[in-house]
Amino acid sequence: MVVLLLNLNFLQVIKANDYRTDPRNSRVLLEEYDRERGAILVGNEPIAISKATNDVLKYLRTYLDPQIYAFATGYYSHIYGSTGVERYQNSILAGTDDRLFVKRVVELLTQEASKGGDVKLTLNAAAQEAAWKGLAGRRGAVVAIEPSTGRILALVSSPSYDPNDLSAHDGGEVRKAWDKLTTDEAMPLLDRALSQTYPPGSTFKLVTAAAALSSGQYTPTSPVPGPERLNLPQTSVDLPNYFKGTCTPGSDKTTITHALEKSCNTTFGAIGMALGQDALRRQAEAFGFGESLNVPMPVARSVFPSNLNAPQTAQSAIGQFDVRTTPLQMAMVAAAIANQGVVMTPYLVEELRARDLDVLSRTDPQELSRAMSPEVAAELTKIMVSVVDNGTATNAQISGVQVAGKTGTAQVGNGKNPHAWFVCFAPALNPTVAIAVVLENGGSERQIEVGGNLLAAPIARAVMRAVLGQ
């Protein structure tokens, strides 16, 4: 009896809120359909609204430009619950939040129709559309961040889905749509921007370069190894540069600047082993690797592996082996360099509003960590500008705008084509946007290090131009 009473208290008191807010709790959802749900806004334009109906569920959740914004809004379904902002800002949208208590009392006294509050997002409509058009249905993601604040300006995952299909009131049609989405091998319900991790490939060389320059042992121009193939200890397998002669023809020495321009694997593999796995891990964590982030949706943790031997450290230093990262995390790496070494906490919700447009709360930018000194950030910025002007990222160039960037092509094995990456920020000396683009299996074996330039850089350029108003 004691155990039963304890369990009852646990369920009804301690876990009550968890069960009440669980997106699978259809009883709570059905109660919420009696009240007009608040809007989700981009700028001051709604991208999710509720329309009155004549059926048992009094309001129908409706999404405008649904596929472009699907992974920001999420869906709101009476069968399958909710995701995205619909889930993580539900109390405001549903009107049950304590901050709306006075409004609810006024509505009760005046017999005014009850309505939830509105959620304004940080997204830039032009950037969001440019990212969506750039991906063009290919598997991948784009994340854009305002470096000085952490505001998320674009959050696009492809392929996408139409949340309207899951918010419909016809249960049969909703289940049919769900079955189709969940059995699609392209996984259109997967948020590749926040929930999926990838090997970052050569974009991770920015992290290794930051660790090297911060150590005091290296400068952008000091001589570093740059052989055509790097002899790795404890193994008969060497680490090659993918294109013969592209790093330092006729020499075994180069500089960090030139090695980033040409994306020399051997240089950063050698630097990684010289610095050691702990230095690389500390630097990655300073950028946000290992953090549990919520934007407000939870973000998959980016990981730098542990217990590495020397060859594994070399591979990890170039973003291979077991290094895994979200596109959001790589946008944070670029944003930190752009923001003089300071990593800002990323966020998607700008404001919470009552139905009369009173602002209930506004998100204040918060510093997450310091990844490097302003001096090291300035050195990396200069090198990344050279990567775009003279190196592997020429497709990111914008007339009249200085762009800082880094390409990457991450090998995934199993005979699959590599992922094509590009990270960047602009304008280089007064940055307003930092971007990460990944295209799953987007490169080809013959394009290894330039895959990011050919495929991902043009998407980033379009997003940059959208943010900059060009």
Image: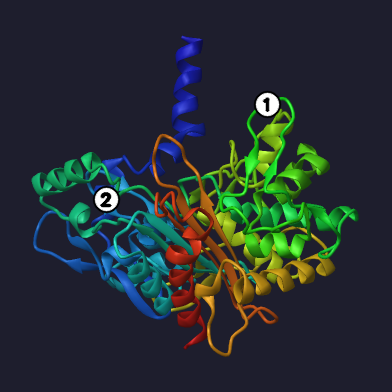
Q: Give how far apart the Cα atoms at labels 2 and 1 are.
A: 63 Å
Q: Residue at x 76, y 70 (%)?
A: 340
Task: Give the amino acid type for the residue marked by disc 2 in the picture.
Answer: Glu
Q: Quadrant of residue 43?
A: bottom left
**Residue at the disc numbered 1:** 235
Residue shown at 78% from the left, 72% from the top:
378
Label 1 element class: loop
Frontmost residue, 431 versus 225: 225
Mark 2 or mark 1, which has the lower sequence index? 2
Image check: 408 left or right of 377? Answer: left
Q: Residue furthest top?
A: 1
Q: Is residue 92 left or right of residue 214?
A: left
Residue 150 in the image: x percent, y percent?
A: 61, 66
User: Which residue is at the far front?
Assistant: 250
- Give the image quarter of residue 193: bottom left
Of 271 and 76, the residue lying toward us? 271
Residue 235 horizontal/vertical position (percent) = 68, 26
Q: Amino acid at mark 1?
A: Thr
The residue to which callout 2 is attached is 31
Q: Position of residue 466 (x, y in %)?
A: 45, 81
Residue 150 drawn above or below residue 329: below
